[in-house]
Image: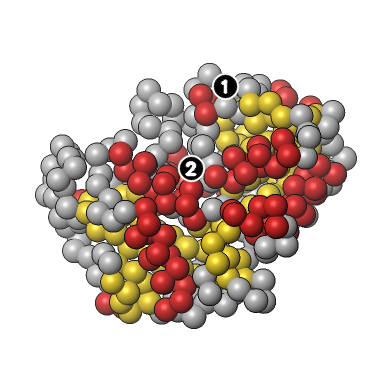
């Protein structure tokens, strides 16, 4: 998957041409995965570019590093302004994906990373549409399990943590499926490699708790809020593996995936094998919100221009 990156990136407080952004091969993060990242989306509605839930992304961006004593040298407000400035500098007038990250720089082979370890921060963007087919995707229950908090902090969006997701994705793709579903260490449903998961049964929603090693996803929280506002019944609880194949509808939620229906799991149809009514309701509502067509949630958007 190749992306046409923006001409300028934001690097340590300055907007510079992409080809001027270089780091040494001795960078600690290259060797040990000591990098923190976020995924943010901005949507062009023909009048303005709107960044979705920028405040929440900036907060999580900082908090992820705290788990590892990795220091972000910029305030949340500076990161938010940097995202806006980057979009303006690149004159972006199409929907895009924005990737902020910070990482430990030259720190030798020292595994004792402290708050004093040198870090660098960068942000780049690229045009982005649908990650998955919105008519529904196939999934498989992965042979790989999601790691638990007993081994690695599950709430940190850290580069090294996502090797687990890479393994699950590789396995799913190699076996002909679009996406994987990971179980936690106890055999309950956790999440997909880069998305949270929701099940619908008898018009009621359920999603796994954070204690099942699920990420506290920003889109996940948005869905929970929307469900309550729509007066739909929703529970956050442990979800067994067998519940997946008994569900009427299943969908994934995530910044890149947005709301993506799962229509088969291990080649078995979910419900009638098509996008369900509740899933479609969330897809349409979410689309209206990010395009600034629903004033009730306009506070979730930050205008660029």
Q: Residue 26's x, y, as percent?
A: 17, 57
* Residue 165 circle label: 2
Q: CA distance from mark 2 to mark 1?
A: 17 Å
Q: Residue 16's x, y, as percent?
A: 30, 77
The extreme right residue here reads 272
In the rendered picture of this protein, how many numbered marks are placed on residues? 2
Q: Residue 12's x, y, as percent?
A: 26, 64
Q: What residue lies at 60% left-to-right and 41% top-to-bottom?
A: 220
**Image height of 74 relative to 276, above or below:** below
Drawn side of residue 8 relative to residue 173, left or right: left
Closer to the N terminus: mark 2 or mark 1? Answer: 2
Local crowd size for mark 2, using a 10 Å CA cut-off: few (<14), some (14–19), many (≥20): many
**Image height of 77 relative to 282, above or below:** below
Q: What residue lies at 32% left-to-right and 43% top-to-bottom?
A: 65
Render colour scheme: secondary structure
* Residue 187 circle label: 1
SS for tag 1?
loop
Q: Work out whether residue 4 can be spotted.
A: yes
């Amino acid at each position: 998957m190749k992306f046409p990156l923006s001409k300028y990136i934001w690097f340590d407080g300055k907007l510079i041409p992409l080809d001027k952004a270089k780091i040494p091969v001795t960078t600690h993060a290259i060797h040990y995965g000591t990098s923190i990242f976020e995924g943010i989306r901005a949507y062009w509605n023909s009048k303005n570019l709107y960044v979705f839930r920028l405040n929440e992304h900036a907060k999580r961006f900082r908090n992820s590093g705290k788990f590892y004593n990795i220091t972000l040298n910029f305030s949340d407000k500076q990161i938010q302004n940097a995202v806006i400035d980057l979009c303006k500098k690149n004159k972006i007038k199409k929907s895009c994906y924005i990737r902020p990250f910070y990482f430990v720089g030259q720190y030798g082979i020292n595994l004792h990373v402290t708050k004093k370890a040198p870090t660098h921060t960068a942000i780049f963007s690229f045009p982005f549409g649908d990650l998955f087919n919105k008519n529904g995707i196939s999934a498989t229950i992965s042979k790989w399990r999601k790691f638990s908090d007993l081994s690695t902090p599950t709430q940190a969006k850290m580069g090294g943590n996502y090797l687990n997701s890479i393994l699950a994705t590789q396995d799913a793709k190699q076996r002909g499926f679009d996406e994987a579903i990971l179980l936690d260490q106890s055999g309950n449903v956790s999440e997909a490699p880069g998305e949270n998961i929701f099940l619908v049964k008898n018009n009621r929603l359920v999603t796994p708790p954070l204690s099942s090693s699920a990420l506290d996803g920003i889109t996940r929280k948005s869905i929970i809020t929307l469900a309550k506002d729509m007066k739909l019944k929703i529970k956050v609880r442990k979800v067994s593996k067998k519940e997946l194949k008994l569900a009427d509808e299943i969908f994934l939620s995530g910044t890149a995936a947005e709301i993506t229906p799962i229509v088969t799991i291990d080649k078995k149809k979910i419900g009638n094998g098509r996008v369900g009514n509740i899933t479609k309701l969330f897809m349409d509502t979410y689309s209206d919100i990010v395009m600034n067509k629903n004033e009730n949630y306009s506070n979730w958007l930050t205008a660029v221009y």
